[in-house]
Image (tube, rainbow, N blue to C red):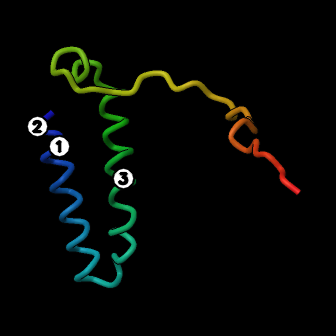
Amino acid sequence: PLILGTIFLSFLAITKRISKKNRRFRMLGPIGPLLTCMAGTVLVWAWPALREDYGVAHVGHVPGGTIPISFGALKREVTW
């Protein structure tokens, strides 16, 4: 986990520096965190040894669907 974190943090710092110095790559600054997140997700998914042998934590299964709507917090008393 330390090596992966160091690599990803270095990538973020490099993309930020490149986006500030060169105007052609200015979108690399905001997209850098998204690319890092996607790369980490793919790495943990593609190599189960990262999870099992090295203890890299992951979220696991996320259920799909929409969030149910609830109006419980909107109840209030109307006073006239």
C-alpha separation, residue under disc 2 versus residue under disc 3: 19 Å
Residue at 58 percent of width and 24 percent of height = 63
* Type of the residue with mark 2: Leu
Q: Is residue 10 above or below residue 73?
A: below
Q: Are marks 1 and 3 in contact (CB under 8 Å)?
A: no
Q: Earlier in the sequence, mark 2 or mark 3?
A: 2
Residue 59 percent across, percent down from the top left: 39, 27
Residue 25 percent across, percent down from the top left: 33, 76
* Type of the residue with mark 1: Gly
| SS assignment at label 2 | helix
Q: Nearer the viewer, mark 1 or mark 3?
A: 1
* Type of the residue with mark 3: Leu
Q: Nearer the viewer, mark 2 or mark 3?
A: 2
C-alpha separation, residue under disc 2 versus residue under disc 1: 5 Å
Nearer to me, 79 or 61: 79
Q: Quadrant of the C terminus?
A: bottom right
The disc at residue 51 is: none
Q: Residues within 10 Å of mark 3 (few under 14, many from 20)?
A: some
Q: Quadrant of the N terminus?
A: top left
User: Residue farthest to the top?
Assistant: 52
Residue 10 percent across, percent down from the top left: 15, 56
Please give the residue where the numbered disc 3 appears in the rendered image: 35
Please give the residue where the numbered disc 2 appears in the rendered image: 2
Q: Is residue 75 above or below residue 52?
A: below
Q: Is residue 44 above or below residue 20?
A: above
